[in-house]
Amino acid sequence: MALSRRDFLKASAAAAALAAATGGRLGATDVHAAEGGIRWGKAPCRFCGTGCGVLVGVKDGRIVATKGDPAAPVNKGLNCIKGYFLSKVLYGKDRLTKPLIRKGNKMVEASWDEAMDLIASKFRESIAKHGPDSVAMFGSGQWTVFEGYAAAKLFKAGIGTNNIEPNARFCMASAVTGFMTTFNSDEPMGCYDDLDLGDTYFLWGANMAECHPVLFSRLIDNRLKNPKVKIIDFGTRFTRTSQMADKYIRFNPQTDLALLNAIAHIIVRDRLYDENFIRKHVVFKKGKTNIGYGLEDKFKFADDPKPMTFDEYREFLKPYTPEYVSKLSGVPAKTIEEVARLYADKSRKVNSLWTMGFNQHVRGTWVNNLVYNVHLLTGKICKPGENPMSLTGQPSACGTAREVGTFTHRLPADMVVMNEEHRKKAAEIWGVPAEKIPAKPTYHATEMFRALDRGDIKVLWVQVTNPFQSAPNLSRYRKGARKGGDRFIIVSDIYPTRSTELADVVLPSASWVEKEGFFGNAERRGQQWFKMVEPPGEARNDLWQTMELARRLGHGNLFPYKYVEKEMFEEYRKFTLGQGKDLAPYEAYTKARGLRWPVVNGKETLWRYAEGYDPYVKAGEGVKFYKNKPNDYKAVIWARPYEPAAEAPDRQYPFWLCTGRVLEQWHTGTMTGRVPELKRAYGGAVCEIHPEDAKRLKVKHGDKVRVTSRRGSIVLTADLRGRGKAEKGNVFVAFFDENKMINELCIDAYCPISGEPDYKKCAVKLEKA
Amino acid sequence: MSGAEEETKRVSRRHFLKGSLALPLALTVAGGLLTVPSLRRADARGFYLRPPGALAEKCFLGACIRCGKCVQACPYRAIRLAETDAGVAIGTPFIIAREEPCQLCTDLPCIKSCPSGALDKGVTEVEKVRMGTAVIIDRENCLSIRGLRCEVCYRNCPLIDRAITIEPRHNPRTGVHTIMEPVVHRDKCVGCGICEKSCVREQPVIVVQRTPLPQQDAYEF
């Protein structure tokens, strides 16, 4: 057994080596191998956006084991503790196995026919009575590419509404608008190889040690090998990442905007910028200021970009002196100077990495723009080991939500519904008249739940996500969902959740390797897997569910496939070809351990926009932002000012509340919560408080504290000694715990450009409970 | 821990205990009935994990009057009383870390409740508690040492970065990752057993053992 396992690993490694030797071309790697009666197949991990490869062991129709895939370039056989327990996440005792229909206060088992008939009749009625914009789909960055594609196609090209949104709006929409406004193309130029190749890493609002565990171990290894490597962690909370960083820089919430402008200020003031790079590759712009917070229903915002000169940008930066920003941020002026010099140091390969601290931010788009500014000023971009890198939290936030375009305003491959050419192209591939796709975006996620509360949306279908735990200002939207009237909510999931409890119909879904799938990770790597086990009971693929609704609504012609996944992928692929987003043929992904797009002539791209790596950049061009045609193929440096948070602490609510994640639990905990070992390792949410604040409140470690915002109140256990250490005047609570839904306290203020809510900043008070 | 429910359970049990007359006996019997035989009581070398502040074992056995007050005082129900199989230690308080470790209450109510001095009232800070020392007894089964990103024991340690630290070293197997090895520091570890409880392996690879005796020599490293 031991021998055969080793042989198998050797074979995998040999196959990987062969693939490497053929210059990244697609070598045949047979990932299905039998061992001890266990059949192993490849799949990406079900959890975060890192996209670790795993081997799934199946025996007698059941997943009996999983292990890190040694041939997977992302993780080379390793996993975090969540990935280690993958084999258990699908086998919780309370798996949903039958469709359920609400009868009064009870959920009653029903057949698929009954459930789908009811759903279809509700859709038909609502569309006939209130128009297509009265029905909506709320999906997920955990949707497979097929599921997202089918849903987008049905809603945009079939039903004729842009009422489709992913939970990714809550998660990385600001990263998308950041990429789009600066480069006019979504997703990073760099890849995980930058973690091995750089020597200076700035982390902004990213607790990589817990939220991207395997990538963090790769980053730390770089430092072990190279004494020059420095890791600088900017944060508002001392985390396990801060503990391992060379330097932790604490700043006051929201002042990251000012800090990045101060860094740019110093770089410009001392002429530390790369003049040649700026002349060739950069234009300067400014947009509207005082852009609001989206707190009122139907809030609308449209930016009004105006070009500016380098001199005007220099003027814009003038007020952001290290002294001024030091007062604002709490970071010593000397530190700001040092950091700016590190960013500009010509002998250093500088990377910035960020996650939710930047994206879940009322100026999320701006702060994304501002970090690009620093990289564009110094020319430290589009080079091996030197890039800004946005990390993602869901396994296919990139692959599905962003690339397929399951947002209200998006179409596949960076296209948008507002653009006539884009609609025409999509309609042509989808085989519908161009008029079918509505030209106006409707609701982004928060507005979608507001519309449900108001009654403008009547029928809402939720797939692969848990918005009635994860939305901000949760109480309003939970109440809104059960206001009755014509409202009708369908939730597809694998377990009972805080969302299924509000549904009129609950559909049991297949998950992960219970279906064929495709995820895209944070480094543009598309990863395919085959179905390996049957889902339990009558549970069915969300893809089937969507297509079944389509058939019942008379849109079955949109899905004329025999081998659904493959043919759908090949259709979707047409959107990407020639657009710098080229995907490989489906067949290639069945063999490779993922490929990073653009994949041209079978070769993946490690660094976008870079000569020698990106096939779209011609010899002699060096770097070319070829997707930014409107800006003469240049990237944009944006003048974006500091503006305060939507709600800051005051006398009544004197603390900042920040929410987030822990290593052992994932998002709303519906999967990790079913693994006893993970529950034992981190069972419930606690409230991290600074010891001095606790002393003032006469709260000891382990005491109960009541945390109250203007929107909600909960009692939590105070944690003064844990893994995360709150700064003075701040508290931190993880959002995974379904019994302690901290999002009831969160404000539903959002970035006006991205529509992404700020889960990291609102005001609360604490009392000993 | 699911808040309110847990709270009521705890209170009602304490209430029940307070009302009981034959308390030590009842606790001993109940302890015997409730504990699962596979859980570790004393280890192979006869080590019982005693409550915080316990005197050295021999003195403790002499001083403890088997009154069960510390059991009542523990808000986490971590302390239980030894049964007949404990011989002379019958009726003395101990902790099965894997089931419910000591949560190191800041005010150490168990010590305060002890009428006999078996739990030393001179121990007033959790950092001074010495119940035992955590040891990684099975390195080959430790996921962190195998290169996975686990370190659950470390992140749950109430004296994180002091009693347990992470010692990163290169992982030659992948060539690009770090092995984040949890290392216990004997001079800081209080032996509360939270690491033992939280270990995700079926058999915990980190357990609390009797603190080894210091051994003198002239070396300063």
Image (tube, rainbow, N blue to C red):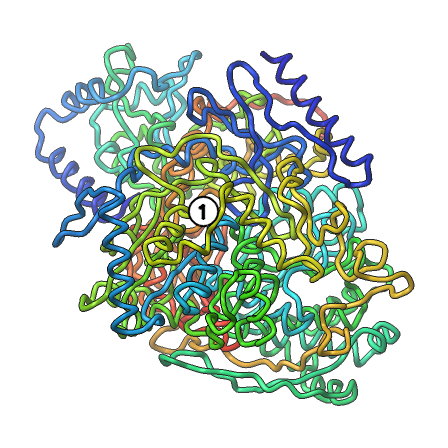
Q: Is residue A488 left or right of residue A756?
A: left
User: Which class describes the residues within 10 Å of circle 1: few (<14), some (14-19), or many (20+)?
Assistant: many
Point out residue A14 in the picture as x, y percentages from the top left corner.
75, 26
Point out residue A224 in the picture as x, y percentages from the top left corner.
75, 41
Q: Quadrant of residue A92?
A: top left
Farthest residue in the right direction? A620
Image height check: is A616 above or below B205?
Answer: below
Quick one: A291 or A534, which is closer to the camera? A534
Chain letter for the residue marked with disc 1 in the picture: A
Q: Quadrant of residue A353?
A: bottom right
Q: Quadrant of the N terminus of chain A?
A: top right
| Residue B25 visible in the displayed image | yes
What residue is drawn where x is 70% and y is 35%?
Answer: B169
Q: Which residue is mark 1?
A: A666
Quick one: A660 or A649, which is closer to the camera? A660
Q: How many marks?
A: 1
What residue is drawn where x is 38% and y is 40%?
Answer: B104
Quick one: A147 or A724, which is closer to the camera? A147
Q: SS class of the residue under badge 1?
A: loop
Q: Is residue A95 left or right of residue A753?
A: left
Point out residue A407 in the picture as x, y percentages from the top left corner.
49, 65
| Residue A202 visible in the displayed image | no
Image height check: is A705 above or below A84?
Answer: below
Q: Quadrant of residue B105?
A: top left
Q: Inspect the image, locate mark 1, and give the three-letter code of the amino acid beneath it.
A: Trp
What residue is drawn where x is 34% and y is 25%?
Answer: B96
Q: Is residue A290 left or right of residue A224?
A: left
Image height check: is A271 above or below B124?
Answer: below
